[in-house]
Image (cartoon, rainbow, N blue to C red):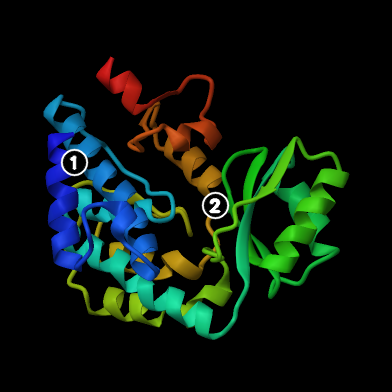
Amino acid sequence: MDKYTFYYETACIKLGLSKDIEKNHGYDSKIAQWLVPFICDRVIYEHCISKGITPDIGIGYSSGIVSASACFKAIPHEAAWDIVKSHRSMLIALDEAHEELDTGIIVGFSYDDLSELLSKEFSTDDLVIGSCNSTFHSMISGKASAVEKAIELCNNEGALKAFRLNTGTAFHHSIMKKYSLEYIAYCNDLKYNDPEYPMMSVFDLTVLSTAEQVARENHLNVYTQMRWDLAIKELEKLGATEFFDLSANGSLSKFSRVGRKCKMYTFDDICS
């Protein structure tokens, strides 16, 4: 917690935020909240390294791509903070355009079944599967009205769970590209290094070992659909049997599925 407090306060000073999250208002409030998991990832990663737990390969879920890039020294941690801050212009642009976007969670359908169900009702301009997380868990993303309608449709079709996240954004939908110009420009201008350890792409399932490959992964992140489920399977094909979820609350382990011969450890497991 001492290390978390130090890193968070340092980041807040750099970004002009209050270290007391609740004292940030407007767009700064969202940026201050989004900063938290980046700091948590770093602290937990460094804890693992200090315990001799070193990765053969890493993978990042959405914003975790940026965290992995920083932890693996492809970019400085300060650059990761600036990437978070760059989303402020995205929030402003969404408000100015009066764009109502959202994401939702669907539990109980395979990727193919959910794709078939949604394709009959929605165009990809309105709604996509932003990420298939496992054989039965997906994140949908798009216009808020479409997400709401899709939730109702899936519940009527027997979903185990289907609910909106009320994010006001539609990450991993192409509509986000025009609202993320500052993010894209920053990623283009940022100097990348070869990662200390290779990474797995959640977009095309290739192994990322060069600065150029990591740069492309970050560039695609906000507005490109991802396949977390297939990336996990690809890691298993490469021989991975132990997975370490570096989120503070084990969030990834709650919707990820690994093979029967594999084990996924959470922060609680690491510290026990």
* Residue 192 position within the rendered picture, expressed as x and y whole percent measured from the top left: 19, 67
- Residue type, label 1: Tyr
Report the residue marked by disc 1.
4
Q: Is residue 116 left or right of residue 204?
A: right
Q: What is the residue that sits farthest to the front in this orientation?
A: 23
Secondary structure of the residue carrying numbered label 2:
loop
Work out whether 58 lies above or below 100: above
Q: Write the residue at 31% across / 49% down.
A: 36
Secondary structure of the residue carrying numbered label 1:
helix
Locate the C terminus by quadrant.
top left
Q: Write the residue at 48% across / 46% down.
A: 231
Work out whether 208 lies above or below 91: above
Q: Is residue 15 left or right of residue 139?
A: left
Residue 6: image quadrant is: top left
- Residue type, label 2: Arg
* Residue 95 position within the rendered picture, expressed as x and y whole percent measured from the top left: 52, 79
Taking depth in this image into account, of 192 and 183 the one nearest to the observer is: 183
Q: Earlier in the sequence, mark 2 or mark 1?
A: 1
Q: Write the residue at 20% across / 67% down.
A: 15
Report the residue marked by disc 2.
227
Q: Is residue 3 left or right of residue 219?
A: left
* Residue 82 position within the rendered picture, expressed as x and y whole percent measured from the top left: 24, 68
Circle 2 packing at 10 Å, graded few (<14), some (14-19), many (20+), is many
Taking depth in this image into account, of 29 and 229 the one nearest to the observer is: 29
Work out whether 189 lies above or below 219: below
Q: Write the residue at 34% across / 80% down.
A: 182
* Residue 54 position within the rendered picture, expressed as x and y whole percent measured from the top left: 20, 33
Taking depth in this image into account, of 177 and 28 the one nearest to the observer is: 28
